[in-house]
Each structure stands twice: as C-alpha cells, then as structure tokens.
Amino acid sequence: RAGQYSIRINEQYRICFIWTEAGPEEVEIVDYH
C-alpha cells in the first residue's frame, strides 16, 4: 500500500501504519510467524 510504513519491533512483530497529515492512522501490530 502506498504511504504505508512498517516498523520492525523484533524478529516477530512489526507495527504497520499509514502516515497522514493528521498523523498515523490504521495502526496495527503484525505478528510474523
């Protein structure tokens, strides 16, 4: 998705969100097995 950022927390989890003018939206923590 365009404009989506993924921040890696550790080897298992990442935070994905979309940055807008108002700030981060659709923030979710993704669990990679």
Image: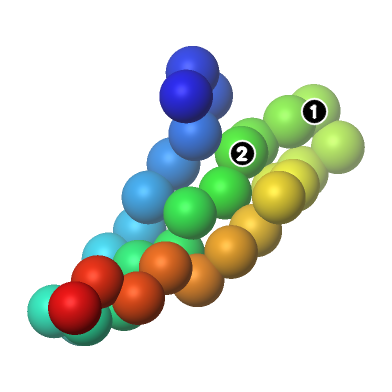
Residue 4 versus residue 32: which sits nearer the camera?
32
The residue lying at 61 percent from left, 38 percent from top is 18
* Callout 1: SS: loop
Question: Which disc number belongs to residue 11?
Answer: none
The residue sitting at the top extreme is 2
Apparent side of residue 8 relative to residue 26 in the rendered image (left or right) = left
Question: Which disc number belongs to residue 21?
Answer: 1
Q: How many labels does the image show?
A: 2
Task: Please name the amino acid that badge 1 sits on.
Answer: Glu
Task: Please name the amino acid that badge 2 sits on.
Answer: Ile
* Callout 2: SS: strand
Mark in front: 2 vs 1: 2
Whether pointer 2 and pointer 1 mark residues with C-beta atoms closer than 8 Å, the reply is no
Please provide percent x and percent y for residue 32. 24, 71
Rendered-image quadrant of the C terminus: bottom left
Please provide percent x and percent y for residue 30. 42, 68
The residue lying at 37 percent from left, 50 percent from top is 6
Please provide percent x and percent y for residue 2. 49, 18
| Image position of 18 with respect to 25: above or below | above
Q: State how far apart marks 2 and 1 are (Cα).
A: 10 Å
Please provide percent x and percent y for residue 22. 86, 37
Apparent side of residue 17 relative to residue 33 in the rendered image (left or right) = right
Apparent side of residue 13 relative to residue 23 in the rendered image (left or right) = left
Question: Which disc number belongs to residue 18?
Answer: 2
Neighbour tally class for label 2: few under 14, some 14-19, many 20 plus, Cα within 10 Å: some
Residue 12 versus residue 18: which sits nearer the camera?
12
The residue lying at 58 percent from left, 64 percent from top is 28
The residue lying at 35 percent from left, 76 percent from top is 31
